[in-house]
Amino acid sequence: MDEEEEERERYSGLTGISQEKMEELVRQALAGMSNKSAPGLDGIGYKLIKRVLDLELERELIREVAENLVNGNIHKEWQHSKVVMIPKPGKDHSKTEGWRPTNLFNCIGKLGEKVVADRLQESGLLHRHQLGTVKGRSAMEAALRVITKAQRCMAGEGGVGWNFWDVKGGFQNVREQDVVKELEKSEEGKKWIPCIKEFFREREFELEWDGKVRGKGKTNSGAPQGSPLSPVIFLIWMAPIITKMEEALKNRWPTFDLELPSYVDDLHLVVSIWERIMAQGIKMDEVLDKVDKIVNRIATANHLPL
């Protein structure tokens, strides 16, 4: 038995979800998919899939997707994509910077990955202040809460500081081994490890611009843009790093009110220092400078480019 077979044997049968229940989850995911989502290489969009609802063809499709998920499989064919190069307005199109690549995955594959994404949001592995693509977490509500706290602090002659970081490269930084390590901490997460390991395998793609196929290739760099599973995988990977940053900052300044909310790959810091503490001669600029050094140190140690 080779290493790959040993891994599959180790995680086989973990989903614990019946075929009937999985088919229900697939149908729920399909109902939430937009008809405007562009199809991948197979040319089959969600609008077409929904048109065959209640027909035997639809039942066979749902059954096949569900059966593969029950067994922890993600077909390689589901992961094939078309990368369409779109020219950026006003840019030099003789250079790569003048083009924006867009990944178009097969909708059937995205349907299966959407089921996994929805279930992983219930795994308890996300940081409490992570927003964006997370059900039940409104970025607007979070922003209003932070602003209200800041206004109260400033009204009491306290101080408020903000800092912002953007994760360079976004999803491509995600490391499979780190994600699997996090999934093993949760019973729900463990169920989907076989699917996640196949999610990270090498993918084939066609490169297209001006309506013509210009070449083919393979890639396995992080979590691919365009997959409904990638944002959730990214958040799971980021969660322990944010926790380390938060703990380090609170250990350094235990009397400060510190929060590290993030919106997918945008990381923010809000420092509220109340009047009694500001009276001790605290200088906000110096605090934010030290905060930036701590955050960047932890980010570098965890292969997170800011």
Image (cartoon, rainbow, N blue to C red):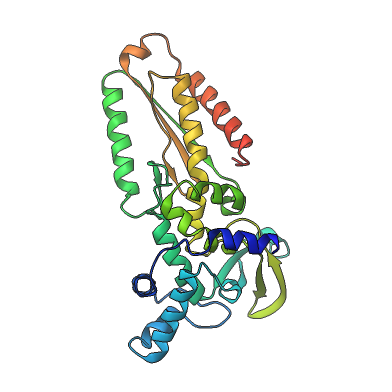
Report the front residue among 259 and 199.
199
Report the front residue among 175 and 45.
175
Report the front residue among 249 and 71.
71
Q: Residue at x 54, y 59 (%)?
A: 11
| Residue 210 position by quadrant | bottom right
The residue sitting at the bottom extreme is 56
| Residue 31 position by quadrant | bottom left
Q: Residue at x 31, y 15 (%)?
A: 275
The answer, for residue 61, to whether it is visible in the render is: yes
Q: Quadrant of the C terminus?
A: top right
The answer, for residue 91, to whether it is visible in the render is: no
Q: Please indicate whether residue 108 sits to the left or right of residue 199 in the image.
A: left
Query: Percent x, y for residue 221?
Result: 65, 57
Query: Percent x, y for residue 295?
Result: 54, 31
Query: Percent x, y for residue 42?
Result: 56, 82
Q: Residue at x 58, y 79 (%)?
A: 41
In the image, residue 253 sits, relative to residue 43, either above or below, namely: above
Q: Quadrant of the N terminus?
A: bottom right
Q: Please indicate whether residue 195 sits to the left or right of residue 160 in the image.
A: right
